[in-house]
Amino acid sequence: MKKEAILVPAKITRDVFRRFAYFDAFYHQKHWQRPLVFALLMSAFSVPCFLLRDRREGAVLLGGALLAVGLGLPLAYLLSFSLSLRRQMKRMDLSGARIAYTLRLEPGGIHVAAGAEAADYPWETVHMAYRVSGCDYLYVSAGRAYLLPHGPSAEKVWTLLQSALPPEKLKSLQV
């Protein structure tokens, strides 16, 4: 059976980009781990202080400070990430009316065209492909991904990805 090329014009809206940014940072790159470990450690350090509240003067104050820092800094990190993402989306002007790039998925690999620039990626070098609700994320390297918002050819795209990539490089997270 001859595989045919699939042309995917990617219109990246604010919502698609926001969901991808959170997915990339907190699922793919696992940036949630360090803030969580920090919060758990600081919370654990505050427990002995609260247990010694009757024996040591200022123990509750120290425990409260450790707990406030342990919970406050991770929350500040999330808020900073969110505000930074908002500024980036404003700077990128993601109205969704124009096509950001076009991908041509072929039996030999992926061809990406964005304006005057173009790039080719053989299937063997593709890092990972994720299917989430409303979009497919095609990581051509650990740090570079192309977003394929679901359109009329979404099922054909996923079928082609399944035939071109080994199962360990495919993850469907669609609910």
Image: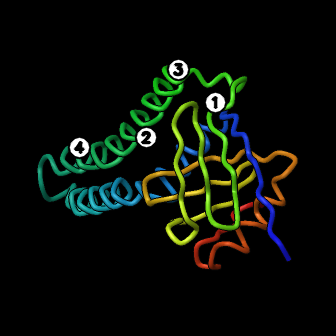
Q: Nearer the viewer, residue 89 or 60?
A: 89
| Amino acid type of the residue that numbered disc 4 sits on in the rendered structure | Ala
**Which of the two discs, 4 and 2, sits closer to the camera?**
2
Helix, strand or loop at mark 2: helix
Q: Position of residue 70 (x, y in %)?
A: 30, 49
Q: Kindly indicate whether the residue at mark 2 contacts the one at mark 1 (C-beta within 8 angstroms).
A: no
Write down the residue under mark 4: 65
Q: Is residue 124 above or below residue 41?
A: below
Instruction: Compute the Cα span from label 4 to label 3.
Output: 36 Å
Say what amino acid the circle numbered 1 marks.
Arg
What residue sits right under mark 3 in the picture? 90
Earlier residue among tags 4 and 2: 4
Q: CA distance from mark 1 to mark 2?
A: 19 Å
Q: Nearer the viewer, mark 4 or mark 3?
A: 3
Horizontal side, residue 21 vs residue 6: left or right: left
Q: Is residue 135 left or right of residue 111?
A: right
Q: Position of residue 109 (x, y in %)?
A: 62, 63
Q: Please report contact status of discs 4 and 2: CB closer than 8 Å, yes or no.
A: no
Q: Earlier in the sequence, mark 1 or mark 3?
A: 1
Label 4 to label 2, Cα distance in Å? 20 Å
Residue 14: image tag:
1
